[in-house]
Amino acid sequence: MSVEAELKYLDVDHAALRARLSALGAICKGRYFEENLVFDDEGRSLRERGLLLRLRRTPTGAVLTVKAPCEDSSAVKLRREYETGIEDMRAMRLGLEALGYRAMFAYEKVREKWIAEDAKVCLDHLPFGDFVEIEGPEEFIPVLAGRLELHDALTTRDTYHALNRAWRERQGLDHEDCFVFSEEERARLEREISGCRYSTSP
């Protein structure tokens, strides 16, 4: 178990940020496609308790994650995180379903991960927009944000699920928990990733 500290930044120019990361000597660990399934029981009791049960697929395999709330008064988002690699995503999904959980919604993103000193900086492209997430020591996140000239960027502690819901409301769209790319867009993104010099494994 570890305590995860993170903060999301909105409306950030990925190309400009990539240049600033390189100038700081940050190391790119890869650009890749992620598929995520969020599980809960029929009564949504995990959500009511502020818990996340997620199964994620990346190019290097599957990961099972449980996130739990932390008592905090920080400007960054703190959560207890339990995470482990999974050899067989299908078997894990069947096991979760046998326990009474089912996939409530799916979401996808393209993630480009950078390591900057003790922090991870993730440039995330989702079906409803581009975001940046910094994860690392609580006190270092605002320091690194300053070095990356993110002073004026909007910040949020919200999940991508909450951000998607807010975006759909602003667009006058019906409520939909899932946010995945169309088949055409996903194929285009996968071609783009395969031809990108940052398309190494996460």
Image (cartoon, helix red, strand yellow):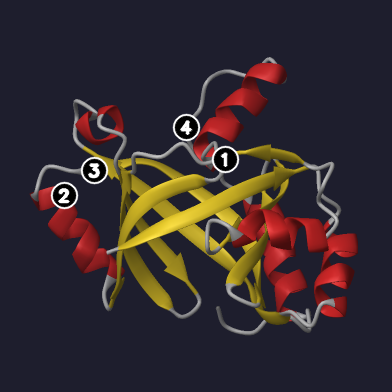
Quarter of the C terminus within the rendering: bottom right
Mark 2 belongs to which amino acid? Glu
Location of mark 1 (residue): 75
Mark 2 lies on residue: 97
Q: Kindly report the distance in space between the C-alpha atoms of the residues bearing marks 2 and 3.
A: 5 Å
Asked if labels 2 and 1 touch by Cβ distance under 8 angstroms, the answer is no
Q: Give residue 105's quadrant in the image.
A: top left
Q: Given this view, does label 1 or label 2 mark the residue nearer the observer?
A: 1
Quadrant containing the N terminus is: bottom left
Q: Residue furthest left?
A: 99
Q: Position of residue 191 (x, y in %)?
A: 73, 72
Q: Tell me the CA gap for discs 4 and 2.
A: 19 Å
Where residue 102 is drawn, which disc sits there? 3
The answer to whether marks 2 and 3 mark residues whose Cβ atoms lie closer than 8 Å is yes
- Element type at marker 1? loop
- Alpha-carbon neighbours of circle 4 within 10 Å: few (<14), some, or many (≥20)? some
Q: Residues within 10 Å of mark 2 (few under 14, many from 20)?
A: some
For residue 181, say whether it is visible. Answer: no
Secondary structure found at label 2: helix
Q: Residue at x 60, y 48 (%)?
A: 7
Q: Nearer the viewer, residue 186 or 118?
A: 118
Residue 193 shown left or right of residue 65 in the figure: right
The crowding category of the residue bearing disc 3, from other C-alpha atoms within 10 Å (few below 14, some 14 to 19, many at least 20), is: some
Where is residue 146 drawn, in percent x and y?
Answer: 79, 56
Work out whether 82 lies above or below 173: below
Residue depicted at x 44% and y 48%? 78
Q: Is residue 57 placed above or below 24 in the rendered structure?
A: above
Disc nearer the start of the sequence (3/1): 1
